[in-house]
Amino acid sequence: MYLHVGNNQNIRTKNIIGVFDADTATVSSITKKYLSDADSRKNVLFASEEIPKSFVLYRDRGGVYKICFSQLSSASLIGRIGRFD
């Protein structure tokens, strides 16, 4: 199954490691550094140009860890995943 994170961006659910709230998760300096490092490696995608409410950490087909920011809330994304289990 796939999780639709917005604007025709889909992530395979079995490759998802975590769904995080952008407001609360980015308070930590460790998370900020991880996101910055991922961005410098070009491993960050944006599902929309709107202000992101959440982000999804996942592994792509090549095994590379990537992050996709979404304008949808983490609760909405988790709810969508829950419908498939």
Image (cartoon, helix red, strand yellow):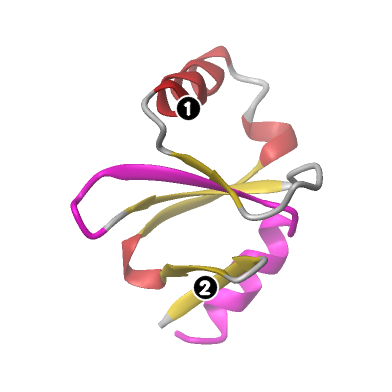
Q: Which mark is residue 3?
A: 2
Q: Is residue 26 left or right of residue 35?
A: right
Pointer 2 local density, CA inside 10 Å: few below 14, some 14–19, many at least 20: some
Q: Which residue appears at 56% of the width and 19% of the height?
A: 32
Viewer-closest of 14 and 9:
9
As for residue 48 lying within the magenta part, the answer is no
Rendered position, 29 above or below 55: above
Pointer 1 local density, CA inside 10 Å: few below 14, some 14–19, many at least 20: some
Circle 2 SS class: strand
Query: Which residue is disc 1 drawn over?
Result: 39
Q: Position of residue 61 (x, y in %)?
A: 23, 60
User: Residues in magenta?
Assistant: 61-85
Q: Position of residue 36 (x, y in %)?
A: 50, 20
Disc 1 residue type? Asp
Disc 2 residue type? Leu
In this view, the residue farthest toward the left is 62
Q: Position of residue 76 (x, y in %)?
A: 71, 67
Q: Which residue appears at 30% of the width and 55% of the height?
A: 60
Circle 1 SS class: helix
Residue 15 sits in which quadrant? bottom left
In this view, the residue farthest toward the right is 50
